[in-house]
Image (tube, grey):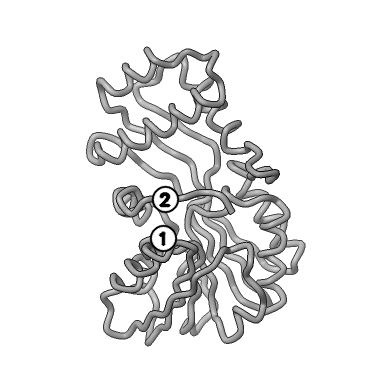
Amino acid sequence: MTGEFSESWLTLREPADAAARSRELVALLPGPVRTIRDLGCGTGSMGRWLAPQLDGPQHWIMADRDPALLEYAAAHMPFPAVTVETALGDVTELTAADLAGTDLVTCSALLDLLTAGEVGELAQVCADSRTSALFTLSVAGEVTLDPALPEDAAVRDAFNEHQRRVVAGRRLLGPDAPEAARAAFEKAGATVITRESPWRLGPDLAALTAEWLAGWTGAAAEQRPDLRLDGYRANRRESVPTATVGHVDLLAIFG
């Protein structure tokens, strides 16, 4: 899998992630949920958001390929009824045996970094183990900025192209991930429920908004150098806009 994320970026985005994720889907989880495996856990923000919403004792298996992030995640689950273990490895290596005894598998902002084939394999692993899945914050490709500028649509389209790029022979799903995941889990026999989970950025989250804008426009410029975005980027830096960034949450339940 591609994608490396710093602790500082993951920490910066945690409040926006927590506000965006669908609590409605949590209420639909088949229970009891006692053992949860969090794929690509990063700093553990998914666990810190979800654990307080679940009843009873929980055991979290934090899985990531970054040992430093695993160490951080394990040390920052401050709930008395929660135990944590870590698993070093890549999401593409997950097997049904890994999910033995697991009630729920989760991930956040991960599916867009996978290929269609990898998402299909992940859905089949969940099906084979009969493990429900709650996958949040998959990029949907929709961005609305206020105030709007004429270049917004071109930047959005270029960014989405960048998200779908080929890396080491792998065609990333990018904003196609929500629909690909829905199709893969339905094909695997799951009942699938989705909800929109947009980020809502702006002056109240100025540091995150500025960092997101830099990454969004930077990827667009890398994908389409002909757009000549220096002036656009300067305008956006000068005054922090409000922004709605589309994501989708997915719950898949097996029988």
Q: Secondary structure at mark 1?
A: loop
Amino acid identity at mark 1? Gly
> Does 190 sit left or right of 15 as displayed?
right
Q: CB under 8 Å between callouts 2 and 1?
A: yes
Nearer to us in this view, 236 or 4: 4
Q: Residue at x 66, y 74 (%)?
A: 95
Q: Which residue is mark 2?
A: 5
> Does 122 sit left or right of 249 as displayed?
right
Quadrant where the C terminus is found in the figure = bottom right
Total label count? 2
Residue 52 placed where, x, y %? Answer: 33, 73
Residue 169 placed where, x, y %? Answer: 70, 44
Chain-order first, disc 2 or disc 1: 2
Amino acid identity at mark 2? Phe
Q: Which residue is mark 1?
A: 42
- Position of 164 relative to 135 (above/below): above
